[in-house]
Image (tube, grey):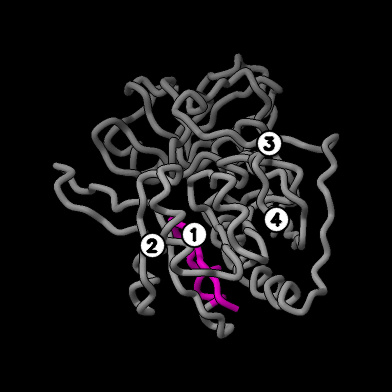
Amino acid sequence: MRIVFMGTPDFAVPSLEGLIGAGHQVCGVFCQPDKPVGRHQNKLQAPPVKQTALKHGIPVFQPTKLRDGTALAQLKELDPELIVVAAYGRILPDDILELPPMGCINVHSSLLPKYRGAAPINWAVINGETETGVTIMYMAAQLDAGDIIAQAATPIDPEETVETLHDRLAQMGGALLVKTVEELAAGTARRTPQDPEQVTFAPLLSRALSPIDWTRPAKAIHDQVRGLVPWPATSTDILGDGVVKVFAVRETGEDTGKAPGSILSAGKDGICVACGDGKVLAITELQAPGSRRMAAADYLRGHPISV
């Protein structure tokens, strides 16, 4: 099938590679513009999807706007049968949605209609979900509201972070996409409207989510930490060393009568803190201001804590 692919970050790469490996004619790739990197922001870095496309000799387009007619003209020239979108980062206008004869489909990293929006993997972990997955759906004018074509589910391990879950869902999305495109070509693909009563949202992340409220239950804090790595990461100021980023915690299973936020012990097994439900969390990995990310035991060698 003749396909235009639209995607930008690492998550989209397995989907693009899956289409190429399945023998489809990916006639063009659209992604976000290169971003400045480095200490002085004086170097440009191509997004992962662009790097993959160029490796396979596929033309790359990086429009800054989609509504000025330029992207539409480029797409008309490419003449795709199908447009596939995976974490592109832009909303497609109606004239682009209506262009390909087989429509526009999207690879979304949740089990829709749950977690529509920009950060579905993070919010599934933050909210303590035990299962998530990927959805292939037709695109519609409303964000992530199109009819569902196919889904695949996977459990979320209680200790799993958003980083490992992201990588697993990316691979699942690529595999499910290839299968779905085959069904579309054969005319056997299903189309199921989303249940509006089951819709939830996954908005963009921000640093406002970072501070840890130790009056919350230990599990809720644990899920918050797992869901915000590597960015924006959780943070706390209870260690007496300014605002410290917290990258990993462990539920100890212990009970305490101490006030939430009290430091109960600090040693090789971590920095144990009382939580709002009387349970104890151990901070096991952190980053002090101006320092690197490290194990709590390494941090304590230069920052002894009085309990």
Which residue is located at x 43 percent, y 65 percent? 29
Would residue 51 be seen by someone viewing this image from the given angle? yes
- Looking at the rendered image, the disc whose residue lies closer to the viewer, 1 or 3, is 1
Secondary structure at numbered mark 3: loop
Residue identifier under label 1: 6
151 left or right of 259 in image: right
Residue identifier under label 4: 138
Real-space Cα separation, disc 2 to disc 4, in angstroms: 24 Å
Closer to us: 68 or 109: 68
186 left or right of 46 in image: right
Residue identifier under label 3: 127
Residue 187 lies in magenta, yes or no? no
Q: Which residues are magenta?
A: 1-19
Instruction: Classify the position of the N terminus by image quarter.
Output: bottom right
Q: Amino acid at mark 3?
A: Asn
Q: Amino acid at mark 1?
A: Met
Instruction: Classify the position of the C terminus by image quarter.
Output: top left
Which residue is located at x 82 percent, y 59 percent? 191
Secondary structure at numbered mark 1: strand
